[in-house]
């Protein structure tokens, strides 16, 4: 198996009960390392209800459950960690909220400097992107795959590649050392369902690593 693993981000709006079934289907289809709950423009109780429905689906399958943007809610609700961006809680404040054992990941766009800073501060992973065009979260940043190669050769801290990644275009990122491939559309909008999306990405990651 390739060293690279799949990281799923949820759609930014979802019905918790219905999505619990969809998530189970995705996770039962193949290898997924972690799931990030990424809801946008919703109130705290909506986030809490989604966590209550989805966290057990992931954690019962030994899949880490990460909350986007909100270290305080991650700590309160038993999530395995939190992902913070450059405009969210700063790393140190996020770490203080979730504790030493939790996972803290940091968005670093296309920046070696931001990634070094996050890794030196103690981040568990750094995320680079958007590698390809995406409508999920349009980005002005467009790193080249060689950023992942440079990072993997220099640093022990794992790197996540995100942004427009599919089974058809992930190979260059896997080959140069992405530790995780993070996707939204390629799984949740797969024409044959999320299970087929997970299988296709697992197969593409495996093939790229051979
Ligand atoms: C794994 C991963 N990488 C990047 C992001 C983007 O985080 P951020 O820049 O804070 O943007 P939002 O996702 O909060 O809109 C992410 N969520 N996950
Ligand atoms: C959250 C995020 N951050 C940078 S790109 C992106 C969206 C990734 O979604 P998709 O896999 O649908 O392009
Ligand atoms: Mg954010």
Image: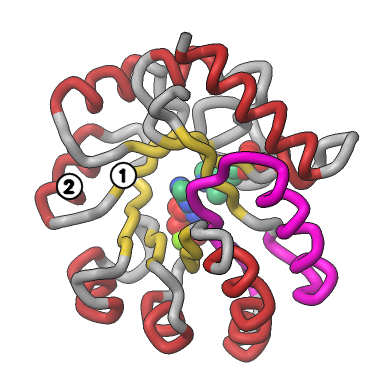
Q: Which mark is residue 119?
A: 2
Quarter of the image where one finds residue 153: top left
* Nearer to me, 68 or 209: 209
Left or right: 2, with 198 as reference point: left
Q: Which residue is located at x 30 percent, y 68 percent?
A: 102
Report if residue 173 lies within the magenta region: no
Quarter of the image where one finds residue 90: bottom left
Q: Which residue is located at x 54 percent, y 20 percent?
A: 206
* Nearer to me, 202 or 183: 202
Residue 190 in view in this figure: yes
Q: Which residue is located at x 46 percent, y 60 percent?
A: 64
Helix, strand or loop status at disc 1: strand
Residue range highlighted in magenta: 12-41
Q: Residues within 10 Å of mark 1 (few under 14, many from 20)?
A: many
Task: Provide the residue designation for mark 1.
Answer: 126
Q: Residues within 10 Å of mark 2 (few under 14, many from 20)?
A: many
Left or right: 163, with 177 as reference point: right
Quarter of the image where one finds residue 35: bottom right
Residue 210: x %, y % from top left = 47, 9
Q: Please report whichever mark, 1 or 2, sits nearer to the chain's N-terminal start.
A: 2
């Amino acid at each position: 198996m390739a060293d690279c693993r799949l990281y799923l981000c949820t759609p930014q709006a979802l019905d918790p009960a219905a999505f619990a079934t969809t998530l189970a289907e995705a996770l039962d289809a193949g290898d997924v390392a972690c799931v990030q709950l990424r809801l946008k423009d919703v109130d705290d109780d909506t986030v809490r209800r989604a966590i209550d429905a989805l966290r057990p689906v992931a954690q019962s399958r030994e899949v880490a459950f990460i909350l986007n943007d909100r270290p305080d809610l991650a700590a309160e609700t038993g999530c395995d960690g939190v992902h913070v961006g450059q405009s969210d809680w700063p790393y140190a404040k996020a770490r203080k909220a979730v504790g030493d054992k939790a996972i803290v990941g940091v968005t670093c766009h296309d920046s070696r400097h931001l990634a070094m800073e996050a890794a030196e501060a103690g981040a568990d992973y750094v995320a680079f992107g958007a590698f390809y065009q995406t409508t999920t979260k349009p980005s002005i940043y467009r790193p080249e795959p060689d950023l992942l190669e440079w990072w993997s050769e220099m640093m022990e801290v794992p790197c996540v590649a995100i942004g427009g990644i599919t089974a058809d275009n992930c190979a260059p990122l896997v080959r140069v050392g992405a530790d995780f491939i993070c996707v939204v559309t390629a799984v949740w909008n797969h024409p044959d369902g999320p299970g087929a999306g997970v299988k296709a990405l697992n197969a593409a990651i495996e093939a790229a690593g051979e």
